[in-house]
Every structure is written in structure tokens, then in C-alpha cells.
Image (cartoon, rainbow, N blue to C red):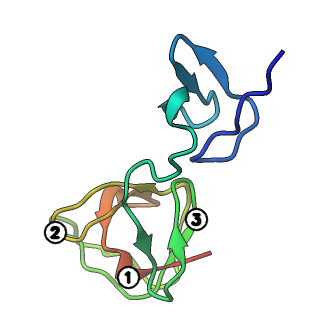
């Protein structure tokens, strides 16, 4: 039995084959098995306020009080956000996440640091 490569997104070793695709059951990422050596799946590089590269599933901490439109409360400094998802944002909002007490929201990368 041939050893399948680890998931390029989360590094999981539990990948499985489905036709021409390789699938990761932990993060749900799918990729073509012929493109495993490509390495750069999306071209999206998101860095936090300190210059650390962020990845899907990372935990981050807010470094500045943020006002939220449509809400009387905002996001306070030091709020820990778990399991972020990186998205291509045309206005700089590249982090999709759920903030405790606020809900689903998109944040700019310059207002968070990697935890």
C-alpha cells in the first residue's frame, strides 16, 4: 500500500483517496493528487501585526479595541479568537472568524496577533 501525503493545509496524516482527489477528513481540504508537489495552493499569504504568517485554524488575539457596526459593544483588546479561517478579502478583511459575544465577523489582519 502506498503512503499518501499529509494534508498541505493542516498536516494531517489521515488523508484518503477519492478518484483523482486526495481528501483530508480533519479540515475538509481537497486537492488533486497530481498537484501535491505544487505546494502553493491559493497564493494567499496573511500576516498578523507582528509579521507572523497566519494559517487556517490558528488562534489569534485582538491587539486594539475595535468598534463593530450595528452593535452597541465592540471587541476589546486581548479577546482570544480560536480557529480562524483565511479568505480572499478585497477590502483587507482576510480573517473570517467567530468572536465570543459578537458572532461571525471578518477582521483585518493588522488588528490581530498570533497566539
Label 3 Cα neighbours within 10 Å, binned few <14 / some 14-19 / many ≥20: some
- How many angstroms separate mark 2 from mark 3 (CA)? 22 Å
Q: Nearer the viewer, mark 2 or mark 1?
A: 2
36, 82: nearer the viewer: 36
Q: Quadrant of the C terminus?
A: bottom right
Identify the residue at image location x=22%, y=66%: 71
38, 31: nearer the viewer: 38
Relative placement, left or right, of 62 versus 107 is: right
Badge number at residue 111: 1
- The quarter of the picture where residue 46 lies is bottom left
Relative placement, left or right, of 37 versus 99 is: right
Label 2 Cα neighbours within 10 Å, binned few <14 / some 14-19 / many ≥20: few
Label 1 Cα neighbours within 10 Å, binned few <14 / some 14-19 / many ≥20: some
Whichever of labels 2 and 3 marks the residue nearer the N terminus, that label is 3
SS label for mark 1: helix
- The quarter of the picture where residue 27 lies is top right
Whichever of labels 2 and 1 marks the residue nearer the N terminus, that label is 2
Relative placement, left or right, of 14 versus 109 is: right
Amino acid at each position: 500500500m502506498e503512503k499518501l501525503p499529509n494534508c498541505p493545509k493542516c498536516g494531517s496524516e489521515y488523508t484518503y483517496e477519492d478518484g483523482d482527489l486526495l481528501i483530508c477528513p480533519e479540515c475538509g481540504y481537497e486537492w488533486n493528487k497530481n498537484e501535491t508537489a505544487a505546494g502553493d495552493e491559493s497564493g494567499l499569504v496573511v500576516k498578523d501585526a507582528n509579521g507572523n504568517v497566519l494559517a487556517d485554524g490558528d488562534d489569534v488575539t485582538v491587539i486594539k479595541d475595535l468598534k463593530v457596526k450595528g452593535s452597541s459593544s465592540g471587541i476589546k483588546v486581548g479577546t482570544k479568537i480560536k480557529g480562524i479561517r483565511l479568505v480572499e478579502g478585497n477590502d483587507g478583511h482576510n480573517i473570517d472568524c467567530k468572536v465570543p459575544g459578537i458572532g461571525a465577523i471578518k477582521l483585518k489582519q493588522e488588528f490581530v496577533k498570533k497566539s
